[in-house]
Image (cartoon, rainbow, N blue to C red):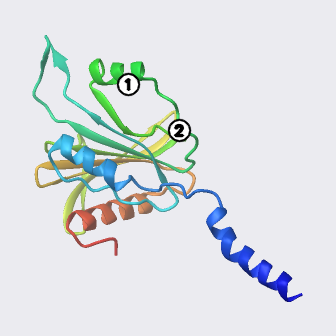
Amino acid sequence: MRRLWLFSLKLLLFLPGCGEPEVEVTLPKEVEKRMEEQLHVDIVVPPAEKLAVKYAEIRYPPIVNQQQIAGPSVAVIVYTDEKGELLPLTDEQRAVMRNRQQRELFYGEYAGRPVIIMEIHTMKNFLADAKSQLIEGMAVEYGQKETDSGTYAFYSFNYDDTAYTTTFLLQNGMTTEAAVDFNRKLIRLLKGQGES
């Protein structure tokens, strides 16, 4: 009986390490660092409650007449509520993204519908026809739009020489309050105040 009890105890101690692998909920730090090196700016990618990062890419200014025109580079980080399998990309597809579309994929893409799209622009940015509110002492422009695919809330603010724009699909528990909370967390992290 004692052997059975000891075996059961060992099994219970061993099993927690054998479960499903943990799903990455935010952007891995090494990916974030590589993106910062490409953009030449520090970026912040906050965790989002019950969401995981689906993919991250940088969009570069377009090339016209074999010259890259002046303009911002944009880091795009997309969160999902149902992170699925990694969608395979061939080297040829990656080359087309980089050379024709001026996009470079840094993480993912994983299956799952986009719930939050966060863009980090290397130049200041403004929303057209937007209202303004203070979040954590920072002026944040915001708006809302109804489309066939759902209702979207948009937020944008400038921080140093960058602009952060966040877009939220308002359904399945994502509310304007949750969107403001995400932006509040983002601003606190930018200001070095943590996630409190």
Q: Which residue is mark 1?
A: 94
Q: Residues within 10 Å of mark 2 (few under 14, many from 20)?
A: some
The disc at residue 50 is none
- Name which residue lies at 84% across and 84% down: 3
Q: Position of residue 15 (x, y in %)?
A: 69, 69
**Nearest the eye: 74 or 173:** 74
- Name which residue lies at 85% across and 81% down: 4
Residue 52 appears in the rendering: yes
> Which of pointers 1 and 2 lies earlier in the amino acid sequence?
2
Disc tally is: 2
Q: Residues within 10 Å of mark 1 (few under 14, many from 20)?
A: some
Residue type indicated by callout 2: Leu
Q: Position of residue 56 (x, y in %)?
A: 37, 42
Residue at the top extreme, as displayed = 65
Q: Quadrant of the N terminus?
A: bottom right
Q: Answer above or below: position of 11 versus 180.
A: below
Horizontal side, residue 12 vs residue 39: left or right: right
Q: Position of residue 134 (x, y in %)?
A: 23, 64
Residue type indicated by callout 1: Arg
Q: Which residue is mark 2?
A: 86
Q: Answer above or below: position of 65 versus 72.
A: above
Q: Tell me where residue 16 sits by quadrant.
A: bottom right
